[in-house]
Image (spheres, rainbow, N blue to C red):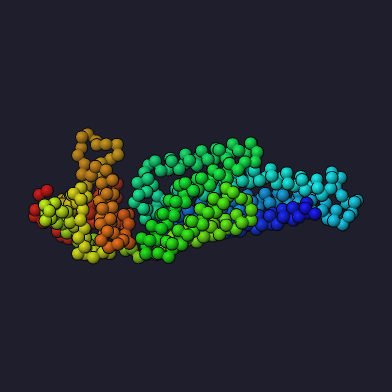
Amino acid sequence: MQQPQLFYESLVELELLTFFGYWQILTGFFAFVALLGIWWHIGRKQKDFGQVWLALSVLCWSFSGSVEVYFANQTNQEVEVVQKALDAELANMDGARLEDGGFTAALDKLEARKAKQKTLLDGLRSILSLLNSLFILMALPTFRHIPKPIEFLLQSKAWFPFIFLAFLICFLAILSTFAAGPSHFTVVLDVIYALVPTLPFLGWILWESFDKRGLKILAWLSVLCIAFTTVAQLYKLYADDPILILMAAVFKTSLIMIFFALALSWVKELSEFVVPQPGHLYLYFDRHKSASGKVVHIIRLKGLPWPAELPLTLTRSPFNLLLKFAQHKQQEADGWLEIKPKKGSRNGKEYDIQDHNQLIRLLSSLLDEVARQQGGTSLDRKQLKEVLFESSPERERLIRLRIPPVNLHIPNALKDL
């Protein structure tokens, strides 16, 4: 009989959905609590909210599992009615047949209910998938190692408005499909939101994070995980079967493990990084002409995790800014430099530093030069700033070198510049 076979297939699908739902609830919630625990003990002190966004993205999978379990339980009553009708027909018990048409009518009613619920289930799944992608995109700017080609985008003021606007458009479009009936459009929207900005950027940043920390195997595993997740997302566009559930379980488990590996590698990096005492830091300046007649600006930093004799060649602007810091440290009692406020100068006052971007460019130039000569560095920009500079506890726009004046070596030819 074809109809009983369809019913048994529906039973298997329902049981699989229920199992997968409970798996998502437990796994997602456990991962959420664990990632949030890492943030509470470590990230909170660093004022780093990246783990919070990643934890919330994983929590979305737990909510998705709750939705699937709810709809599976809602269908169980109809299943029991159909099962009773099927048992009656198979036993040829005419008196036990349902008055409204028996097994066939009950099965049709079940299929109609499943079709109606699937529209709502797909919509809620897509909304939670959108939230998952949104939280991941919110976490990306907080990563310590961001590839240079996309750093300007993730650190720009337009990043958060852009991802929120894209999320809002997709969210409203999904809501509009609820009243229109069954539609594959809801699945397409969350897949597009995952494929266009989320997965490529996440994969690139995961590679950069593990690679910069010397964890090559994890870097390649993260690439494989993102590639498999991409395939699973594309498969959602063409099928909705048990294979998709298996693929979802695999890529969600893999991503959770990658997130934990990332968090633990970050903890390891923090534990290995110790801010050196100011008295152990030495800064040497040099400026001379090369054989071609070009002026070369060189500094040497001693006391950092790279060779003391490593000559770092800088362009004129970052070199002069660092030199200004050193000169103020030697010539003035406090050595503070003031950064110009964002709203502009006040009463025509001249400021030592025109904006925060000057400092960012200086730190980036130092790290880029070290990475070029050494093939990489364990320091990031935030750590290097903590090593070299200190901010005033009273005024946030005041900053100075941490290095003592006696440890600053400025040639006489540069002192009057």
**Which residue, as the protein is rendered here, is positioned at the far right?**
95
Q: Is residue 408 above or below residue 354?
A: below
Residue 127 left/right relative to 107: left
Residue at the image position 24 percent from the left and 36 percent from the top: 346
Residue 10, percent from left and from top: 72, 53
Figure quadrant of residue 206: bottom left
Count of residue discs: 0
Q: Is residue 67 above or below residue 276?
A: above
Figure quadrant of residue 264: bottom left
- The N terminus - image quarter: bottom right
The answer to whether one can see residue 131 in this image is: no
Residue at the image position 47 percent from the left and 59 percent from the top: 224
Of residues 178 and 343, the one drawn nearer to the viewer in this rendering: 178
Of residues 333 and 362, the one drawn nearer to the viewer in this rendering: 362
Residue at the image position 61 percent from the left and 56 percent from the top: 243
Residue 30, percent from left and from top: 55, 59
Residue 162 left/right relative to 246: left
Residue at the image position 66 percent from the left and 46 percent from the top: 118
**Which residue, as the protein is rendered here, is positioned at the far top?**
347
Residue 204 left/right relative to 364: right
